[in-house]
Amino acid sequence: MITPELRESRHGNRICRQIHKLKKGWMLHLCMYLSLILAIAIVATKHSKCSRTMACEDEWIGLRKKCFYFSSDTKNWTASKRFCSSQGSELAHIDTREDMDFLRKHAGTSMHWIGLNRKQGESWKWTNGTIFNPWFEISGNGSFAFLNADGVRSSRGFIDIKWICSKPKF
């Protein structure tokens, strides 16, 4: 015979089982919701990292697809080249008139090493090995090029002057 207490107990167990099922469903929805939030956060983080690599670092100045670093210190050409390499860059390459105008403006009246050099009797080459297409004049008889307010000149590379590094933004 089913007593009222037993009936309440059975009814109570059913209610407990239903509450337990609801809790499981709620937990499943919560887990799905948290997974979605985590996925969005991961995508947003990857996107923001991409954005950061597109911008130039603190002391670097951007122009189109390049970042430039203007030193405040002075070194000879070889030491300047070594510094740029340590920064994952090269002594500045000047590919366009816009690059030239930008660099001259930011260099001011100071002399800055750039990434052109030559061996005696050979053509000027950029530090990455490509031959210079002489779209601007390099005056002087030296083997290492520098930029100043008057344009690009050459030197034997032994003097300590400022330098400009360049690297792609991406």
Image (cartoon, rainbow, N blue to C red):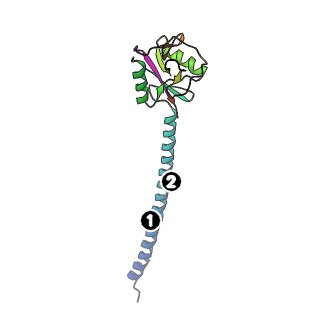
Neighbour tally class for label 2: few under 14, some 14-19, many 20 plus, Cα within 10 Å? few
Can you identify the residue that label 1 sits on? 23
Q: Is residue 31 above or below residue 54?
A: below
Task: Kindly state the secondary structure of the residue where label 2 is placed.
Answer: helix
The residue positioned 46% from the left and 69% from the top of the image is: 21
> What range is drawn magenta here?
156-166
Is 64 one of the magenta-colored residues? Answer: no
Tag shown at residue 36: 2
Mark 1 or mark 2, earlier in chain: 1
Q: Nearer the viewer, mark 1 or mark 2?
A: 2
Rendering quarter of residue 161 = top left
User: Residue 81 appears at what percent x and percent y?
Assistant: 43, 24
Comparing 98 with 27, the one in front is: 98
Q: Is residue 45 above or below residue 150?
A: below
Is 164 one of the magenta-colored residues? Answer: yes
Q: Quadrant of the N terminus?
A: bottom left
Q: Is residue 52 above or below residue 95?
A: below
Q: Is residue 97 left or right of residue 90?
A: right
